[in-house]
Amino acid sequence: MDAIVPLVRNLIGIQFEDIPPQVHAATKKSVLDTFAAMFAGTNAQGCPEVVAQALEWGGKEESTIFRSRRKVPAFLAALANGMMARAVDFDDVFEPGTMHASASIVPAALAAAEMRGGLEGREFLTAVTLGIDLMCRMGRTHKIPSGLSGMNVTYQYAAFGCAGVVGRVLGLDEEKMIHAMGLAYSQTSGNSQNLLEGTLATRFCQGLAAQAGIYAGVFARGGLTAAKEVLEGKFGYYPVYHRGQYDRRHLLEGLGEKFEGVHVTLKKYPCCMHTHAAIDAVLDILAERDLTPDDVDGVMVKVNQQGFNFVCLPLEKTRMPETIPQAQFSLPYTVAAALVRKKVFLDDFTMEEIRNPEVLKMAQRVDCLVDGQLEKDFQSYVSPAVVELRTKKGERLRRKVLERKGSPDNPLTLQEVEEKFRRCAGFAQPPLPEERGEKILDFVENLENQKELLSLLQFFA
């Protein structure tokens, strides 16, 4: 039996009451965190252009584009909103799979719920929980790291997860849900070349995955068939994309009893997670020592191989990023920004700021190195860092961070997520009125008790 069968049965069989309260709490934090990222991404490069094109195409008014009162076909809303959720790299991540968990799932669920004419809050919460769980289970399976394979599994797993969440919202039965998964497989894509070149497709592909979920669920509901041995057939996902190198156990172990969403990392900084431990380390040092950029002679940052591949190469580009995505995936730039500005937030990733001469000068003094011990500890600590800062007085200040702020073992509190939401809403274009933001916070806090999810949409515009 292909592993997709028990996975699908879990997707359609689990009810709200079957999920522990702490899992629901984690999902609500992820939903709120995704809304924060979407507000921050409303005016990010590429997003207004995609929104404008979606509105120009128009069509059946099914689902709302975020921060707009305009409705478009659900697949276009999912595309635009998914791109916004990923655009500023502030959405959550699942460390074991090195992938983004909620940025496609939440927009796809919202678009599907509005398309079907409404949904209770607890059913939305359940659907999102199960979609994230499926995606993260897949994220644990692959044995070839994305940084080495050249693929970007975020978009591939998101297509499956979104097909699951849309299928759940639309009420698909087992047979049609399996076809939805086959249709998702037919749309899987994603590569790491966009990361290397710092292109806007990095964020666009997150929207494509949400769109793929809408396509998969809707067409499966209408009777379109697809491969049933989706994951493990002769030419299924794992044999084709991963050369058969995967751990099946992670797909099914504890299915319906353990939910992977509790292991998702919520970001403290709007940049690649492989930079966060180093940023934490720098800010810890600065909290103890009142250093200025002129006091710093150089910085050595030690990371594991995967982190090195993602945010340190090629060194000449990471020290001198030309685009915002390149800056978001640059360890030298983010460390330099932390040293110069003593913080890292959304306003550090604008075209003006990534050309800041003082920050770029500091970035030239940041060196990166693969640390053998951190590499050995990879299974325990996905993205740790050791920062060694040299002052011009000859001092060496060292800080090691294994669990960065926001990780499952060092999580953001609900209050910290709420504050992140408020700050991101203030960066929206135009900024969200404070009273609407507070209504969204209250709505999400009581999501399981909301009789109609769609009443939330009035506060987004």
Image (cartoon, grey):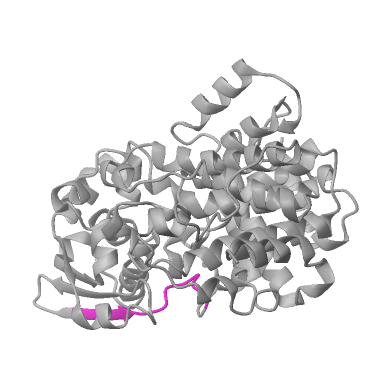
| Quadrant where the C terminus is found in the figure | top right
Left or right of 46? Residue 105 is right
One can see residue 331 in this view: no
Left or right of 294? Residue 135 is right
All told, the count of numbered labels is 0
Q: Position of residue 169 (x, y in %)?
A: 77, 49
Instruction: Give 206 or 324, whichever is nearer the viewer.
Output: 206
Left or right of 296? Residue 147 is right
Q: Position of residue 6 (x, y in %)?
A: 66, 67
Q: Position of residue 154 (x, y in %)?
A: 46, 54
Q: Is residue 431 magenta?
A: no
Q: Residue at x 44, y 52 (%)?
A: 235
Q: Which residues fall within the magenta stretch? A: 397-408
| Quadrant where the N terminus is found in the figure | bottom right
Instruction: Give 441 or 144, whichever is nearer the viewer.
Output: 144
Q: Residue at x 35, y 46 (%)?
A: 191
**As drawn, 247 above or below 417:** below
**As drawn, 216 above or below 76:** below
Q: Is residue 402 magenta?
A: yes
One can see residue 82 in this view: yes
Q: Residue at x 41, y 58 (%)?
A: 239
Res 241 quadrant in image: bottom left
**As drawn, 428 above or below 175:** above
